[in-house]
Structures are given as structure tokens and as C-alpha cells.
Image: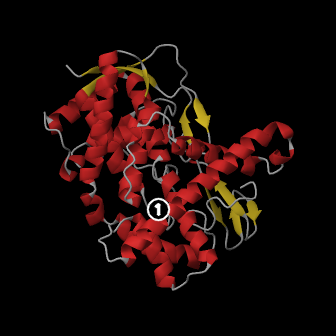
Amino acid sequence: MFLLRFLGNGLITAMDHDIWYRQRRIMDPAFSSSYLRSLMGTFNEMSERLMDKLDEVATQKTPTEMLKLVNCVTLDVICKVAFGVDLNFLTQTESPFQRAVELCLQGMVMYLRDPFCRLFPKNWKIIEEIKEATELLRRTGEEWIEKRKRAAENGEDVPQDILTQILKTADEEKVTSSKDHEQMLDNFVTFFIAGQETTANQLSFAIMELGRNPEIYKRAKAEVDEVLGTKRDISFEDLGKFSYLSQVLKETLRLYPTAPGTNRWLHEDMVINGLKVPAGCSIAFSSYVSQRLDKFFKDPLKFDPERFDASAPKPYFCYFPFALGPRICLGQVFSQMEAKVVLAKLLQRFEFSLVPGQSFDIKDTGTLRPKSGVICTIKPSS
């Protein structure tokens, strides 16, 4: 991106099947069911930080931008569970990381849609900022990777997290070249961005739609109250009881797929709707489009969690917010566990309402996010 390596040859972007498969096989243990269960403590701890912050906001009685707050939480989660670093973004007035992620995604969109954009002087300032953001993320990855390497070499206990798996990738391949060092950084940047950006945006859209649909809000809150009562920590078993909350999150991803599409290379000639498409072509699939077609979803622009009731027909091959097939998103279960914990705690402890007059438009920054940031007034739940 703008002559700098960005996602490189990491798990999402690797086009060589063998390279992708080796990386995926090594990463799988970091997303096993047993390991994900062990993360419930971290999900609860980081969500409690948000609840403390919302307590302050409620006391001050000032509107707050929910996108910024949930962004801090999801960044805290991915830094802690993936890389063993606790930064507590909710206490930082100005962190470079959130802005860096936004700039990198913005740069990706600019670069993919218009490879010549760097030739125009009006873009030079933002392009320099994007390059600095890219360098910041890769430099941070280098520092954290080196720190973990030293810890392992000194015989210290290291968590079996994503960072350990990234190092294991290189170790199993028995390579130490600069090329493979760069691939480790590719995966660091991939997980740093993908592990927080999409979940934060999903949570923000869910809060927005709950604020716009009082009956759905009321039903989701009633379910949370029934499952949790007054207890503070959410258990792994509790997550399975949030059936309606799960439907709300799935419907949020239908209307607002935070990663709005995916690509696949054709390995052989195909005929699609009478059109011959030769092997070697890249095909783009838009989940944003297919998930809003009335061919598949009645009254598609209506927010209706009932579409995902257990008795409702399953929307095969037209609903794929996490992609489909062998390269389906590795972190989808992680993401939805985290989203349920944060949203359930919010519904249990607070009442929120949307500030009138704000936009409900979507901002495309490579991922989709609410343009307004979802500005809410917050008060403790009665």
C-alpha cells in the first residue's frame, strides 16, 4: 500500500494455498473451543472497564459516542488475548492506535479503488499519514514479537495466544530470513486490525438499531435480565442462553456486514448466469448486496431479528458476514463471544437512547462503520 508492506502475505491475504494452509493450521489452536472458554475472564474484565466508563458518562449526563468507547474495549481485548499486552485504552485521552487502524483501512480503500491516487497533490498529506500509520503498526508488532521471543528464550511462561502461534509459524517452518520475519508482522497487523475493528463496528450498529427499535430493545433487555439477574460476571454457559441477543447480532451483520465482501480466485473456467468466466479471474462477492436483496430476505431494509429464529428458514449462500468455505473467518466465534458479553452487560446495567438528529448513514472505510459514531445518552438501569 503506497509502496509500503501492509497486510503482506498473512492469513487473510495469502493467495498461495499451501502458504495459507500452513498458517491456518498453526493458528487453529489459538481459536480452539477450550482456549476460547478460557477467555471469558478477559472478556468480562475488559467489559467491566467499559461499564465503569459509562458510569462516569451517566453521572456527567453528557451524550457520548458509543463507537469510540466500544473501539477501546475491543482494542483492549485483542491486545490482551492476542498479544499479552494491557494498554487500557479507555483511560487514554489520545492513543495513536485507533487512528492508525482507521488510516490504514482508509488507505486500503483509496489504493484499491484508484491506484493512481498518489499522483494527485491533494492526496499527498493523507497518504503520508497513512504511511506513518502503517509503519507504526508494523513497528509495534516488531517490538512485541521481539519481547515475546526474549521471554520464551529465557524460559519464562508465555501464553498460548495468537502471538505465540505467530512465532510458532516461523519455528515450524525452521526459517529465520527477513522474508519470514515480515510474514510474522503481516499476521500481527492482520489480527490487530481484524480482531477489533469489525467487532467494534458490529456492536455500534447493534446499539444504533436497538435505539431505533424500542420493542426489540425491550425484548433483548428482558432476556439478558432473565439470564443474568444481578450477577456481574457472564459465564460461557450464559452465552448459549442469549438466543434473542444472538439473533439481534446476526441481523446486525445482515444489514451491516462490517467486512462487506470477499474475493475468490477461479481455479478453472466457470459459466455464471450464461457468462463464461476464465480460470485465473478474481471474483468479488458482496455480502452487503446479497444480504439486502428481497429475493432472499422479505422487506430487507427492516431490522428484524426474527429472521434468525431457530424455526426460520436458513439463508444459505446469501448470508456470509464472515465469508464461507475453507477460508471462513477464523475469529468469528471469538468475535461473537466478545460482542455478546459487551452488549449483555450494557443492556443489564444501563439504559441508552439515541441523541435526536444524528445520521444513520454508513461510512465505508474498508470496513463499514456508523457515520455518526452512534451518539447516545446513558443512564443507569432502573
Question: At which x and y percent is residue 37?
Answer: 25, 59
| Residue 225 x %, y % | 18, 32
Residue 69 in the image, given as x and y percentages of width and height: 42, 34
The residue depicted at 32 percent of the width and 27 percent of the height is: 54
Quadrant hosting residue 35: bottom left
Left or right of residue 310: residue 108? right
Question: Percent x, y for residue 224?
Answer: 22, 35
Asked which secondary structure carries label 1, the reply is helix
Looking at the rendered structure, the kind of residue marked 1 is Trp
Q: Nearer the viewer, residue 149 or 321?
A: 149
Q: Quadrant of residue 290?
A: top right
Please, which residue is most extreme toward the bottom here? 174
77 or 112, nearer to the observer: 77
In the rendered image, the quadrant that contains the N terminus is bottom right
Residue located 49% across and 68% down the image: 326
Quadrant location, the C terminus: top left
Q: Which residue is mark 1?
A: 144
Q: Is residue 34 above or below residue 67?
A: below
